[in-house]
Image (cartoon, helix red, strand yellow):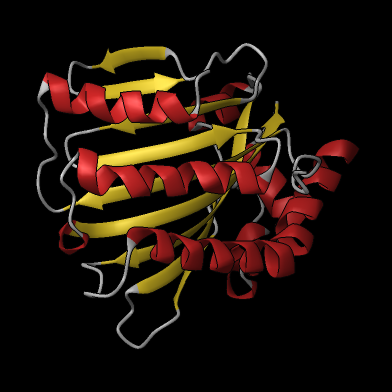
Amino acid sequence: MNPYSSLSDDFYINMNLSTEMELPRSRDTVLHFFEQMQKQYPDMRNFYSRDKRDFVLEEDKDNGNYRWCTVESRRICSGQVNPESIEGVVAQHRHVLEIAPYALSISTLDCESLDFLMGFDFSYKGNHNQLITEALGICPAMEPLGSIPGTTIISNEPNLTFAFDEECRLQCRISIEPRTSAYQIRTGEYQEDQLSVYVTARQYGSLAANQTYVETLDRLHEICRDIVDNHVVDSVLHPLARTIAMG
């Protein structure tokens, strides 16, 4: 069961593991890693290279619900778009982190950062910046600037990052990304595009000697879900959806 499917037009959960060192690039190593993924998820059968540097394995995208995984030069990514259940996509990310240390020779010492991201996309044909302003407002200190006669807000990208520890290694970031250009505002010609809300929990740096990637992922998942459920849904997602519906 996915409790977030009705909150936006598209919903996805991604995991990104960035490494300090280059990942192995040999044909046998990369294929072995993806074979382990396909063994667990047989519908992941579309394999290709992107820009001759990144390798991708994914399911068919036709029904709008699909898994994907990539191996880049210094990053492993995993995701699922419009997942049927949260538990299923988290299990996918855990599987990647369970096989990656062996298949790709990744040590917990090699961690630059580990991300758990929950993304919400709203399809909207219009000025995304104005939509954000109407739905969420702007910082009180900036409100007078938003009412200057004859002006138009052409960039409004709220974001907030906070740390959960004194060393600032465990962080969470909430960001809203509009995709309206100044050209569209000037001409009044808008295309339907995605307005995105991202909630990202991130662990920076090498992990402790007794800490695993899977344990760290579970902690990031817990943080992300708590922030989304208790803060983002009512304060960000619902206002955006209501304003779009009224527009």
Q: Nearer the viewer, residue 151 or 62?
A: 62
Residue 211 in view: yes
Answer with left or right where residue 238 lies relative to residue 127: right
- The percent coordinates of residue 132 (x first, y second) are 67, 49
Does residue 155 appear left or right of residue 191 in this picture?
left
* In this rendering, position of residue 136 left or right of residue 162: right
Quadrant location of residue 144? bottom right
* 87 lies above or below 25: below
User: At 66% across and 61% down in the image, what residue appears?
Assistant: 228
Please identify the quadrant where the N terminus is shown: top right
Which residue shows up at 32% across the image and 26% down it? 34
Q: Position of residue 11 (x, y in %)?
A: 65, 39
Find residue 58 and report its image quarter. Answer: top left
- Considering every residue shown, the one lying at the far right of the view is 246
Q: Residue at x 22, y 17 (%)?
A: 51
User: From the viewer's perspective, is residue 98 above or below residue 141?
Assistant: above
Q: Is residue 177 visible?
A: no
